[in-house]
């Protein structure tokens, strides 16, 4: 009975497959996989034979106005339609919400081209992109709530693919198929079952088998999973489009081209159940769509989002060879890949170029693997397997190989499409392209490139830097700074060069489309984004967060928007003047001091605003000095660091540079004088004492008593005894070297310790001395050696590469140091301890 039931079931599926292309009711059903060359080739053959009067195509209905543009002769694939929606609030940016990519292997592309040739009416059958976006957002929000994550995180430039086919590629049936065939993933299973049949002439048999495969995938998918998103609503729209096509006048059949997962309910509609369809009428999301350039690597990447095919350039090669009528298109395409790989390796990695016998062996083994697996010719998996076997010598392919990475690039492709001029792209996109080309950026393909910019000496390089920074502010992802001055952190501000990596990608173009409502030039769009960022500070409760505002000011300045920062500068002044946190104000002062020192490179030369902000922050920090007296224990370290920053900036700013006002050092001295005899935490007391000594308000002997006394007289727990010394080293590390009384007192105290006492305070001492920079450590060591009458040469030895002579000298120095340690009874410290 089981055998009979199984036979009957197989017969039912076979009958279903035959119905798809029998013209039942005037309809031909073509289940496809997006970007499948086999589907595209067989679909082209089918449409050429049946000459449909109408084509019902699974694409968002609001893309219909762009259909005439898709027949333009200047189009070069890959391209994509990007759908852009208004934000939920009036102040929101317009966000790219959906992509529909077209590759040379897209069945939809073949259908649209042939529709124009045959004069077939095209009806786009899917829900509008705005409705699909709304459903996707709701689904993500629901999923986030289910996972206990609150609101879902959204990457504004990440592709939301409207060609999603995750239900087909990741179904329970697909998992079982992968195991049954013994392949690595669904893509390899699909290749074996269908792409290997790209050169066949029987389009009916091909779509019969694809249809059965997709029907099994749907049957294995739980009904509640299908109903969880907008699948049912979309399918209701598709059936409505079929009815619209049927009502058209004229003779000839109707071709229904949809993702294979939807085909079963196109040919056998279920009973109407509106409550399951979840049709979201009047979603309130308004969209506008544009054609943009797309890239091969993004076509490959979309496989990770549940749509499309991997290695798009490979499938383009295969499709081209099949279309040319080659007797063995698979081997021809595989040979193309291997030859192009060889050319790439000779050009880029000559040391990895394989010899001719290895190349021949690779092609032969790919053919042998195809024969072994019962295929018509080598496919993507066979090429990769053969390359791992024949081209890798002494490498572990699991850990990555430059040769295999080059092969994957060759299979993926590096092409970027082109849309026709006048295709309706916003002026902002063209403005950015023109600016990029004028500044020497190559955007004709999607290849990642590096750019080294001499930003201080070459005006064109500075303009290129500002362009990269403004593109970063706009959120395009066009460039990434690898190294260069960090004005916000005050790091490497004297560096002359910036190094960037950049690439043009669909995400760049779609982001610019989204920002096109803000203006038709880079500057206008950037001003609008900057204004929103300033507004967002207030909406996020950070209107008085001077630190966040100053960081935004730095970003804007590097983007060349200094002249547009008046409102931001005006907001920073009151925020700094009312900030109650001493440490945060000191950080703000440091950032503003960096900005003032870099005012020429940042575009603030001749503008009084930044210097005035620096004065405001300086005065506010001094006003908050009394907070050191009431600081909580956990705040003391950062308050002392803040005092060190304040002291350093005050000393450096006491002498005014060109175009700036001097900082009044007396203000700091008076503020510190009021704290010298205050009841402070030991670290804060040491820091204040150090500055008091530098201003002449505290003698060297008094300083030594305050800083070394707790260590000498064992005041407090062992770590606390070193806190005052740590405070001094934090703000004035050079004092220990320059003040003999201080160093003598410390030496006397340490010499009087027995071993147990010394070991007890050693961790805290080591931590305190980490405040010294390497050159300061060297200088202090030299002073100590001189005071001890030692003839050790402790001058810094690492200014350049070490010679053999220097290495021998260092070895002798190490030996002498070891002898001294032994003489002082510290020889055990040199012995290696067993783990």
Image (cartoon, helix red, strand yellow):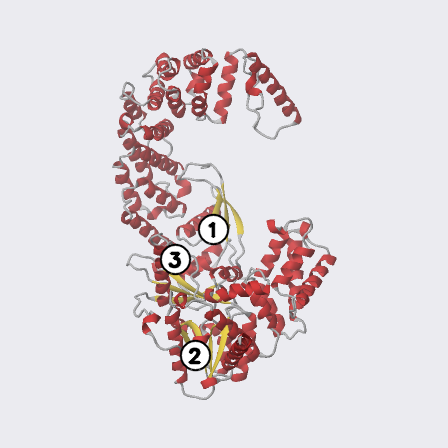
> Foreground residue, 15 or 498?
15
> Foreground residue, 48 or 457?
48
> Which is nearer the N-term, disc 3 or disc 2?
2
Q: Quadrant of the rendered structure where residue 573 is?
A: top left
Q: Secondary structure at mark 3?
A: loop
Closest to the camera, between mark 3 and mark 2, is 2
Q: Residue 614 — which label?
A: none
Query: Gap in Å between the C-alphas at discs 2 and 1?
Result: 51 Å
> Foreground residue, 106 or 399?
399
Query: Residue at the spot x=58%, y=21% of the render?
Result: 831
Q: Position of residue 312 (x, y in %)?
A: 55, 64
* CA neighbours of label 1 inside 10 A, class few (<14), some (14 to 19), many (20+): many
Q: Which residue is mark 2?
A: 268
Query: Gap in Å between the C-alphas at discs 1 and 3?
Result: 19 Å
Query: Residue at the spot x=41%, y=84% of the render?
Result: 246
Q: Which residue is mark 1?
A: 479
Q: Is residue 620 above or below residue 29?
A: above
Q: Is residue 489 above or below residue 383?
A: above
The number of numbered badges drawn on the structure is 3
* CA neighbours of label 2 inside 10 A, class few (<14), some (14 to 19), many (20+): few
Query: Residue at the spot x=32%, y=25% of the render?
Result: 665
Please say if the residues under marks 2 and 1 sit with CB atoms less than 8 Å apart: no
Q: Position of residue 730 (x, y in %)?
A: 40, 25
Q: Quadrant of the rendered structure where residue 266 is?
A: bottom left
Q: Which residue is mark 3?
A: 521
Query: Gap in Å between the C-alphas at discs 3 and 2?
Result: 52 Å
């Amino acid at each position: 009975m089981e055998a009979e039931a199984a036979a009957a079931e197989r017969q039912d599926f076979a009958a279903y497959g035959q119905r798809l292309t029998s013209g039942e009711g005037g309809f031909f059903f073509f289940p496809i996989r997006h970007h499948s060359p086999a589907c595209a080739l067989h679909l082209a053959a089918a449409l050429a034979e049946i000459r449909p009067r109408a084509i019902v195509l699974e694409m968002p209905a609001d893309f219909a106005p762009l259909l005439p543009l898709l027949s333009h002769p200047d189009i070069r694939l890959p391209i994509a339609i990007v759908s852009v929606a208004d934000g939920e609030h009036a102040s929101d940016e317009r966000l790219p919400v959906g992509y529909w990519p077209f590759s040379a292997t897209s069945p939809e592309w073949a259908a649209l081209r042939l529709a124009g040739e045959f004069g077939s009416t095209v009806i786009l059958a899917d829900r509008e992109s705005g409705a699909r976006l709304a459903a996707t957002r709701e689904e993500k929000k629901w999923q986030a709530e289910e996972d206990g994550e609150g609101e879902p995180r959204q990457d504004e430039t990440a592709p939301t693919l409207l060609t999603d086919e995750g239900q087909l590629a990741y179904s329970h049936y697909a998992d079982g198929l992968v195991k049954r065939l013994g392949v690595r993933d669904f893509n390899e299973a699909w290749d074996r079952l269908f792409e290997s049949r790209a050169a066949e002439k029987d389009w009916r048999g091909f779509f019969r088998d694809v249809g059965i495969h997709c029907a099994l995938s749907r049957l294995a998918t739980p009904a509640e999973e299908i109903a969880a998103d907008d699948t049912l609503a979309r399918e209701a729209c598709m059936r409505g489009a079929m009815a619209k096509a049927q009502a058209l006048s004229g003779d000839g059949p109707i071709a229904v081209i949809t993702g294979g997962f939807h085909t079963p309910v196109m040919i056998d509609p279920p009973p109407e159940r509106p409550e399951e369809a979840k049709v979201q009428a009047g979603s309130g999301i308004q969209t506008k769509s544009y054609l943009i350039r797309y890239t091969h690597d993004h076509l490959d990447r979309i496989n990770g989002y549940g749509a499309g095919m991997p290695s798009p350039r490979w499938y383009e090669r295969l499709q081209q060879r099949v279309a040319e009528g080659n007797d063995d298109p698979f081997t021809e395409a595989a040979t193309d890949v291997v030859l192009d790989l060889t050319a790439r390796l000779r050009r880029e990695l000559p040391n990895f170029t394989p010899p001719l016998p290895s190349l021949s062996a690779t092609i032969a083994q790919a053919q042998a693997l195809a024969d072994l697996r019962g295929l018509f010719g080598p496919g993507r998996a066979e090429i990769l397997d053969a390359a791992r076997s024949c081209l890798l010598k002494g490498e572990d392919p699991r850990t990555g190989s430059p040769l295999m990475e080059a092969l994957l690039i060759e299979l993926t492709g590096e092409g970027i499409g082109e849309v026709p001029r006048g295709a309706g792209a916003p002026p902002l996109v063209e403005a950015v392209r023109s600016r990029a080309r004028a500044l020497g950026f190559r955007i004709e393909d999607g290849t990642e490139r590096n750019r080294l910019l001499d930003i201080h000496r070459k005006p064109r390089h500075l303009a290129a830097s500002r362009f990269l920074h403004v593109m970063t502010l706009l959120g395009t992802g066009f460039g990434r700074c690898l190294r260069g001055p960090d004005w916000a952190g005050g790091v490497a501000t004297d560096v002359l060069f910036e190094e960037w990596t950049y690439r043009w990608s669909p995400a760049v173009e779609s982001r610019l489309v989204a920002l096109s409502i803000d203006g038709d030039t880079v500057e206008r769009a950037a001003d609008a984004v900057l204004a929103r960022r300033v507004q967002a500070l207030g909406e996020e409760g950070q209107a008085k967060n001077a630190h966040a505002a100053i960081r935004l000011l730095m970003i804007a300045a590097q983007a060349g928007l200094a002249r547009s920062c008046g409102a931001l500068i005006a907001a920073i002044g009151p925020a700094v003047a009312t900030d109650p946190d001493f440490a945060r104000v000191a950080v703000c002062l440091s950032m503003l001091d960096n900005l003032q020192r870099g005012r020429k490179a940042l575009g603030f030369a001749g503008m009084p605003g930044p210097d005035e902000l620096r004065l405001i922050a300086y005065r506010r920090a001094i006003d908050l000095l009394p907070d050191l007296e009431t600081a909580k224990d956990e705040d003391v370290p950062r308050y002392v660091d803040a005092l060190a920053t304040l002291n350093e900036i005050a000393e450096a700013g006491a002498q005014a540079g060109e175009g700036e006002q001097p900082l009044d050092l007396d203000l700091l001295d008076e503020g510190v004088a009021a704290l010298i005899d205050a009841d402070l935490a030991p670290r804060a007391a040491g820091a204040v004492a150090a500055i008091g000594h530098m201003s002449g308000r505290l003698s060297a002997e008094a300083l030594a008593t305050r800083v070394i006394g707790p260590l000498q007289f064992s005041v407090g727990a062992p770590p606390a005894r070193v806190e005052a010394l740590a405070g001094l080293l934090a703000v004035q590390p050079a004092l220990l070297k320059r003040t003999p009384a201080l160093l003598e007192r410390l030496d006397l105290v340490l010499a009087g310790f027995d071993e147990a006492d010394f070991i007890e305070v050693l961790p805290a001492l080591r931590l305190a001395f980490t405040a010294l920079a390497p050159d300061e450590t060297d200088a202090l060591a030299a002073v100590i050696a001189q005071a001890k009458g030692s003839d050790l040469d402790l001058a810094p030895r690492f200014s350049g590469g070490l010679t053999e002579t220097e290495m021998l000298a260092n070895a002798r120095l190490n030996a002498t140091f070891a002898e001294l340690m032994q003489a002082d009874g510290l020889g055990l410290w040199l012995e290696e301890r067993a783990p």
